[in-house]
Amino acid sequence: MASLFSLPNEVLLANVAAQFPGRAVQARHLATLFSLRSASCRALVVHGLEATGKSAITRALLEGLCESSSVQHRRSSNGASQAGLLYAIIDSRECITGRHLLEQVIGAVAKAVGYTGNIRRCENITQLVVELRKLIEWWCSPDPELAQMRSFVLVFDGIDRQREAPPTLLPALARLGELIPCLTAVFIVTLPRPHFLHMNGVPYIHFPIYSKSEAVQIVSNTSPTPELPTGPEDTKAFWNRFCSAVWDSLSKHAGRDILSFRTICLRLWPSFVAPVLDGTYGPKDFGRVLVFKRSLFQDERILVPSIVPRTDANLIYKQQGVGTQLPYFSRLVLVASYLSSFNRPVTDHIHFMKGAVSRRRKKGGGTALSRDHNGVAKSRKISRKLLGPQAFVLERMLAIFQTIKQDADDRGRVGGWRRNRPLGLAGDADIQSAIATLASLRLLVKQGGANSADTLDGGSKWRVAVGWDFVRAIARSIGVEVEDYLAE
Amino acid sequence: MSVDGETSSHVGFDATEHQATYIYTPGSSDRPQKRRKLNGSSAVEHDDALRSKINFVPLLNGLENEKSVHVRRELYDKFWLDTESQIEGILNEANERTLAEVTEPLDYVPTGFVVTGPNIASQGLLFNQLSGHLISQINGPVVTLRSGDASNFKAVLKRLIRDATNQSPNEEDEEGEGLSLGQKGRKLLPYDLELLHNYVTLHGSERVIVSIQDSEAFDGAVLTDLITLLHSWRDRIPFVLLFGIATSVDLFHDRLSRRATRCVFGAQFDVEQTSSIVERVFTKVVISADARLRLGSALVSSLMERQYDHVQSVQAFIAALKYSYMCHFYANPLAVFLGMSDDPKAVRKVLQDEHFEALRNLPSFRLRIQDLLEQNEPDYARKLLEDDEKLLEEAMVSMNTRDHSIRDILRALHVLASSSKVLSVNVQLFMEAFTGSIYDSGTITKVINAIKRMGPEPLRETMQRIIEAIQEGNKELGLDPWDDEAADFVQSMKDIQVQTEKLVEEADEANVPIRSKYSAQHKVLRTTVIAQKVQLSHDSAKLSPHDVEFTSLVDRLIELLRNYFTIISPQNDFMNEIWLYDYRSPYRDVFTPRPRFVIERALSAPHEYIDTSIEELSSAKPATALLYEMYLENGSLINVFDLWSAFSHQMSSDDDDGNNERETLALFYRALADLKSLGMVKHSKKKTDHLAKLAWKGL
């Protein structure tokens, strides 16, 4: 038998390092902690921000280790076909509940060890331990004397984002390694809270964010489309310089992670190389293309991920928007809701009461205009627009609706028709259904629980969910100037 | 008021339904039949049976014979089915375009945003059609998720998996069990996408389409979870996501979290907007020459108004239209005459004396007689009044002329629209023509003035358009080409066209421009300075011989068109009551209820609803109404004791006995409970013994 301690396989490490630039150190640490004959551990935390290669490197290493260990093992135990190191990766994103996670663990482990028997349901963490132990023991059973030389790595990817996780889940999983022989639990998390496993002596491996040279190196490995007409080599060189330029101009300050950097590069590329493709510039004129297309690097809209291709047609559509498609009175209701959300109820009589002299009520002995001698208000007021929409009572919105209805002209309505109904809409069911429609479009949001009260109960609280620009456009389309009614 | 009187006045109305207490008298000892689930075929039979059973009521004071009732019923069925199929054709055509548009790019786009517009009612129909279309086109399950069955993330997933795996109709139950068992006898949870994965591998599905019908109504967190989960499974299950968006893609985008935003990127599809579909449906069923029943301008404008102000839904419009048809055939005994154009003999058979009498009582008949007398034909008028056969003849003639006059209007409007670039034949224009107000609105004058000012080339094009319009007709308006009938008109048009061309050629040779004396360039503004005063004067430039000739051509054209645009409104023709339906109030009562207004009105003016002939009630209001009055006088917080003392004072002052406090208190409690159940008051947490006012009058 060989010595008990050996360093991880250099060939494997070299492979991984070539595949993932800038991650040689982390890969070496991980390999050491995973390998059978080096400093193997029972629990391990891998942490780092998003898109720093945690999952990919762990997976690649485990794959490599699994293969090489099976080769070694076969040699030592005269052709036994079993691997010395097995692994299973459980992605928490795909686990809908904590229970689902446990089921997934059992399923993945059984699949990895090739267990063919019946598996019981796994409803809590205790059952998980029992079942896991059974599986691992079954795996080790053919040659128990080699059990020391076996190891099973169980990777929990993104376990900090697990939905509906019971509070004891993490500490319990961390102790799996203590309860079950030859099991290693690995936790891949973004930002570990201190002591989140409630366990001492767990090694942490940090994956720092990539530096510029590393990021550019990684992204230049992807091949862009379309290629330059002169061939892949020119394309490669051009792409490299392009990536570097994008990093300096855009990604350095926003969207530093590899994924968004790559997305931005790929999205800008077609329009950047357009002058080369149509032959205006040659493939060597990177500098001139850069100057010619400099507007691309100044436009920061690209940093906000969009869900549809950005075209000019979209912009036109946006201007027309949903506002013109909503029925006339729905628009009016929306404007009234905005006003009720952003005006304080106290000021309503100033804005909406016809011919009323604003009553000034003195409270607490001071006059209404009590101010400091300097002319500076005692408490600084924050604009209501900045405070966000406040909840309002439905009845109040209806009152405001009736008021602004009289001032709205018929601009948004079908032209030329005789207005044969005097617009007394009080208590009209159509208005109520307009409110319900707006609510299901989530332009209005009902406060409180969904089933708390009748939707159209006069006392129910609502909030508007559209912004100032939207409302102003809608209001103009029906001939209402929102500014006239909005408190400062 | 006696209970007996009430029950006898409402035949077929279950009075016990609205009584607080009643004596239960079991009718028979049989146990009620259990409801059996009906499958498709028997439901249809049931429907047919119902249709034959529920018949129209005999009209004409109950004297109308059964056959005539039957004819009305049949006519209604026929006319409405015709109209309905026309509408369906339009709807299918509109959605067909969208379907093709959406299906095609799904081959390479993982996500689609179907912008349906804010009409939620039509989303269901569209998505049904969409999934039907996709199932036939694509190998793989299509699932439609609605916000109603998406209370939480687990429920959505369960539904998604269940719907997707139950899709093959001939699937056996064993297979379903096989799916749920997963690998090696492990039973999978119902929300585990592994199930779907097994199904997909088993059936070799190329795509799994998940369409989310009302994305806005979904809870934001659920939607984000769903998107990220489906995204992470995309390497194993070929998901395609379709979002139905009622507002706009930008608003939808704002609502998604950044994490979810990264997972969806796709194409946007715009569904044809409801307003344009409604416009087309209107054109087809209200304007077109094939329209079976004419709707009057008041009703149509009401319909249009509600469409644009409130609902914007095709379904609501169709319902209203159907209701109009129903009302007409149900309530108008003379509707049988509408069948005459198809089968006069059958109609003649069912006609009875009362029909003729009713016909003679029509206002339009009176007008007709007056006309005849004014034209000095008293004999004919007398015959119409006395001889049924003569009247029938006249009726048939007038039914035919009605068709013609409507067609003539449509033709004139079509020509009018084609001679102007901005005008199109829409409902508004048609209604103006139909009611005869088109002259007042100046539409024709505008078009003619525009033609007057044209140069030779635009003029020639306009004439060409008019001739083409006549030669081609218009399918949407149901107009066939009518160049045979308008041969004179077309010929003189062509003459003018040829002459204009000749003139242009001549002028080109002479290298001078042509314009008529009406053209704008022809007028010259002249400034003259006389005695240090500036005088402005309009002056017309001299006309060359070409110009003079061209002007005369223009004059001829204008004359021709003006004659052609003479539109006679058929609205008040004889028998218009039979083919024209123009009552707004049934529509308004049925489709635009005002529940809150009615309740408030009933409470504030109860004497309008209660039989005032009874002495007691006329003097005092019901307790609830009285309390409501006091309620309205209060502020937003109501002190219950104050309310009670005011109430008891009011009651005792009315009452002679005075000291019947317990009874008054009971009335007070009941009235307050009534107000509470109407949602007007509730307990206030702000102050003890106070009620919060929830509803104000007139909102």
Image (spheres, coloured by chain):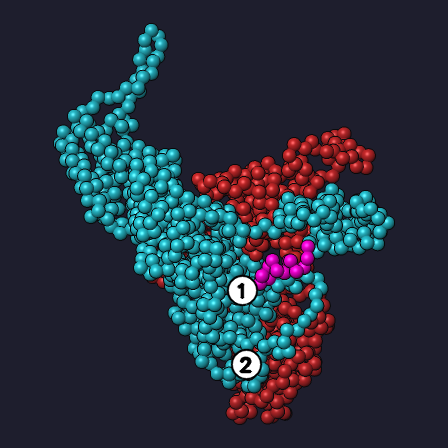
Chain colours: A red, B cyan
Number of disc labels: 2
Q: Is residue B32 magenta?
A: no
Q: Residue furthest top?
A: B531
Q: Position of residue B109 (x, y in %)?
A: 43, 63
Q: Secondary structure at mark 2?
A: helix
Q: Is residue B128 above or below residue B686?
A: below
Chain part drawn in magenta? B1-13
**A4 or A428, which lies in front?**
A428
Q: Is residue B119 above or below residue A36?
A: above
Residue at x-position 56% and y-position 86%: B185
Q: Position of residue B197 (x, y in %)?
A: 50, 76
Residue at x-position 23% and y-position 40%: B463
For mark 1, name the chain.
B
For mark 2, name the chain.
B
Q: Which residue is mark 2?
A: B180
Q: Left of B412 or right of it: where is A292?
A: right
Quarter of the C terminus of chain A within the rendering: top right
**B303 or A55, which lies in front?**
B303
